[in-house]
Amino acid sequence: MPLPHSDDAANQLLRDPDGGIDRLLEIMRRLRDPVSGCPWDIEQDFAGIVPYTIEEAHEVADAIERQAWSELPGELGDLLLQVVFHAQMATDRGMFGFQDVVRAISDKMVARHPHVFGSESRDKTPEQQTVDWEKIKAAERGKLDIQARVLDGVALGLPGLTRAVKLQKRAARVGFDWPSTDEVVAKIAEEAAELVEARDQLTQAEVTEEFGDLLFVMANLARHLDVDPEAALRAANAKFSRRFGRIEDWLAEAGKAPADSDLAEMDALWNRAKAEEKAAKAR
């Protein structure tokens, strides 16, 4: 029996494994159908979907970080679904459609790569291409009159450390930057001292503010060292998880769980895990 509000061609497309993007668009259209769609999908709006969009982007990054290549198609599909979902919600409101999204990014890629699609020379370093990319972006913002201030346009929804680096890069373009890492390190020491003072004498809100200041300067140091702070923190998280897992393994061999241990024992096992990793790297 045919599905409601659908013609035979659409039904056939739904079941075609080679239907490509048209199949996915039809699936999302059906899910959002106000009569026959999924109640959860129907009630969603842009703001409600944003957390899922961010989560799916992080899961793509996680699969790449773990080199889980067999998982990557599925994770990229989940992220693509988010784009399709937002486009369908926009279509439902008469704002724009998926093809407008495709057209916008296609036009942008052509315009921002004149050394590939235009007459400019390709004889540039990747660093020079990055500089040129930013110049083109700035020119685009100028034409649209959407950036009256230096820091305008840095997305609010970015992860905190990433946004901090982008804000700092924008400020650095107009000369608001320390000349070397020495000044940044000195500022870190200053902010750390202020955090300790806040911990001992001030309110929790002020402690939070000082902690944020310290993180912001740490992000600045990462920028000066050409380190991606988000990637560095992900690597540190992975290292902590890996070493703590070894602690659990060794405790289990002794018939114990972490809750049965104490800090001194676990700290000794942590140092053992560090030594084990160092020896493995030396081989």
Image: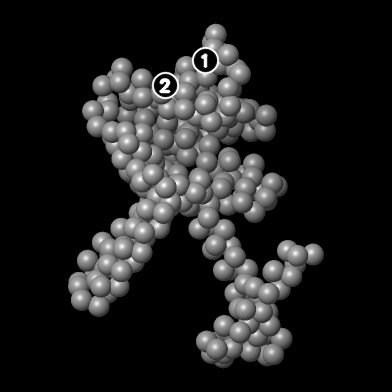
Kind of residue at disc 1? Pro
Vertical side of 215 occupied by 16: above or below: above
Residue 248 in the figure: left or right of residue 80:
right
> For the residues marked 2 and 1, what is the alpha-carbon distance in whole angstroms?
10 Å
| Location of mark 1 (residue) | 114
Instruction: Depth check: give the residue in front, 257 or 133.
Output: 133
**Image coords of residue 83 (percent x, y):** 47, 35
Residue sticking out furthest to the right: 283
Quarter of the figure that contains the N terminus: top right
**Image coords of residue 14 (percent x, y):** 59, 32
Say whether disc 2 or disc 1 marks the residue closer to the N-terminus.
Answer: 1
Vertical side of 148 occupied by 197: above or below: below
Does the residue at mark 2 contact the one at mark 1 (Cβ under 8 Å)? yes
Secondary element type, mark 2: helix
| Location of mark 2 (residue) | 136
Instruction: Kindly identify the residue that appears in the image at 53 percent across and 31 percent down.
Output: 127
Q: How is the image coloured?
A: one colour
- Identify the image quadrant of residue 176: top left
Instruction: Depth check: give the residue in front, 203 or 30.
Output: 203
